[in-house]
Amino acid sequence: MSAFGVVFFILALFFAIALHEFGHFATAKLFGMKVERFFIGFGPPLWSVRKGETEYGVAALPFGGYVRIAGMNPFEEVPPEDRDRVFKAKPGWQQAVVLVAGSFTHFLVAFLIAAALLAFAGAPNPTTTLESVQQKLDNGQPSPAAVAGFEPGDKVLSVEGKTIRQWQEARDIIRDSPGKTLHFVVLRGSRAVTLTAHLAAENPEKEKVGFLGVSTHFFNRRYGLGAIPESGKIIGGTSWDSLKALGTIVSPATITRIVKQVTGSTKRTLKDPTSIVGIGRTAGDFAKRGQFAELFFLVVGFNVFVGVANLLPLPPLDGGHLAVLGYESARRRRVDMRKLMPIAVTVVSVLVTLFVLSLYLDIVKPIPQLPG
């Protein structure tokens, strides 16, 4: 693991936190709201300075940050002279902009990094030519690819009669066919060869998907101006994947698995949730191997995940405030935020518990190193 990769990720993390809070801060100031605090971190202040009406500082627990806007705390007593400058005194669209601005910065940073990488450095793209063939599965049995007679250098032309132009097309068919028999046509040298493979019903990560047991050659593709739409696709796809991942993380099955890992001998896999420590370790592994494109795309994925998570319609997240704002706009009446405090406390308790358990596991039972 490379110290450079870990330090790079830590700096990227603090930059993302600062930019997120700056999004709230800048838009609130733009609309004339009174911003009382701009802090990186939570808990006891380590350093702070007051400029004008705002206190800027760094707190002891580096797990996020916050901007305190007058009137957002339901238990706060607002002085009469500030009542026109509190959050709720502003038009609904301005409140929405301030709430969305934090997550918007994450999506913007992710988009710019992805676009720059694709345009100038390029990204590895799999070909339909096989680089290696796995000989045995984890249980010691021959892999479907080995049994079928696949060889390194074979170029996949078709699967089940469908012409394959990109490896993703073949991969999708394979994954969607657990335990099924598929017919492949490959180009071996100058001749076409037909191969029949009976796929495994799960992959090494124990997912119930078809598994063949091959890896492909990659080439580096630079997109130029095409990086703009391609980056949009990446952000969209990563956003959807992040939403599904969030649903998985808080599912009873995942929580039960985490508890078993903490209290028992259940092994962790690459599919298990990880904390900042685990992500930092992955960043270090990428840097150690010289996989700097993957390192930057890790930062892209992290930013998108945080942006999506903050928009979940749960108090006290930004999305929870947006949901309240939408409800107030539709019903044309104010919501007493104090009544939502039990929900907010529950959400925070669950998130903190999952974070602490994942942090403990990343230190005591780290996820296996990425292959490669």
Image (cartoon, rainbow, N blue to C red):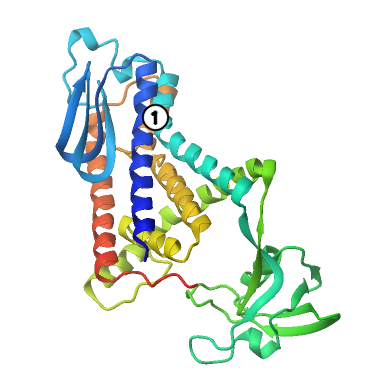
Q: Which residue is mark 1?
A: 23
User: Left or right of 301: which side holds 115?
Assistant: right
Badge 1 amino acid: Gly
Q: Is residue 19 above or below residue 13?
A: above
In the image, taking residue 248 as reference, residue 44 lies left or right, namely left
Q: Is residue 101 above or below residue 148?
A: above
Task: Indicate the quadrant containing the N terminus: top left, top right, bottom left or bottom right.
Answer: bottom left
Left or right position of 18 against 205: left
Q: Position of residue 105 (x, y in %)?
A: 44, 35
Q: Residue 100: horizontal and vertical position, in percent?
A: 43, 31
Question: Which residue does the image show at 28% across and 57% down from the upper left?
Answer: 354
Residue 228: name its quadrant: top right
Q: Nearer the viewer, residue 167 or 141?
A: 167
The residue sitting at 39% across, 22% down in the picture is 27
For label 1, the crowd category at 10 Å Cα-Cα, with few meaning under 14, some 14 to 19 and many 20 or more, is many
Residue at the far right in the pictured view = 191
Q: Which quadrant of the view contains residue 195?
A: bottom right
User: Which residue is painted at 68% across and 76% down in the image?
Assistant: 130
| Label 1 element class | helix
Q: Is residue 51 above or below residue 372?
A: above
* Image coordinates for residue 302, horizontal then vertical, percent: 43, 50
Residue visible at 54% across and 92% down? 141
